[in-house]
């Protein structure tokens, strides 16, 4: 199943908030960190707030944060909210009722699998993936002789 870009952006915003050490995140900073436009980031924050995943505080020292702990936010629940929002705003093909039930059942099964993972799981996986690999000790470079008989480094 292919998800729309908005769903990907929404998940990335939630994971960034889960990974942050600060309670409040500035939307402009989130946009910069994630390589998104501020307009898209504000849109995602708005949708996530309406879905009950994020909370915001206005003002000079305001920002956004997760509305509940990251381990209480299931990925499938986020996908449901964002994908249904996108499908309501887009015109699509009308399917016969039997096919519509089939696709609805398949979507529910897909969400059931996604709900086995939380935003906290995704944040932790991202942390471990970004850890630098242990570097091997560099071998000393042996000088080599030039045609003049002098040694030089490689």
Image (cartoon, grey):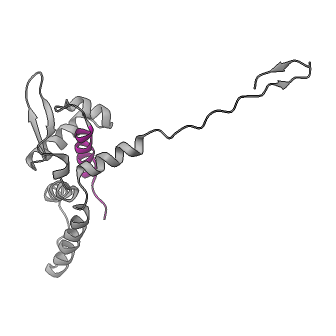
The magenta segment is 1-19
Q: Is-magenta flag for residue 15?
A: yes
What residue is drawn where x is 27% and y is 39%? 19
* Image side of residue 103 versus residue 154, left or right: left
User: Residue 109 at x, y = what percent?
Assistant: 22, 71
Residue 12 coordinates in the image, percent (x, y): 28, 45
Horizontal arrangement in the rendering, residue 66 relative to residue 129 (left or right): left
Residue in the image at 24% along x and 50% along y = 119
Percent x, y of residue 103: 21, 73
Q: Foreground residue, 133 or 64?
A: 133
The answer to whether one can see residue 70 in this image is yes
In the rendered image, which quarter is residue 85 located in? bottom left
Residue 51 % position (x, y): 10, 50
Extreme-right residue of the structure: 148
Query: Would you identify the image quadrant in which residue 114 lies?
Result: bottom left
* Residue 5 sits above or below residue 92 on the image: above
């Amino acid at each position: 199943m292919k998800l729309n870009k908005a769903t990907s952006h929404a998940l990335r915003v939630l994971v960034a908030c889960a990974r942050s050490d600060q309670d409040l995140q500035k939307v402009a900073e989130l946009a910069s960190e994630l390589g998104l436009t501020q307009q898209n980031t504000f849109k995602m924050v708005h949708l996530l707030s309406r879905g009950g995943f994020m909370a915001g505080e206005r003002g000079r020292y305001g920002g956004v944060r997760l509305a509940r702990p990251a381990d209480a936010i299931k990925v499938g629940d986020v996908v449901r909210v964002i994908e249904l929002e996108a499908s309501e705003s887009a015109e699509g093909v009308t399917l016969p009722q039997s096919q519509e039930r089939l696709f609805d059942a398949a979507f529910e099964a897909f969400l059931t699998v996604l709900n086995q993972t939380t935003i906290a799981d995704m944040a932790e996986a991202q942390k471990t993936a970004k850890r630098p690999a242990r570097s091997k000790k560099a071998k000393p470079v042996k000088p080599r002789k030039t045609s003049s008989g002098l040694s030089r480094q490689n």
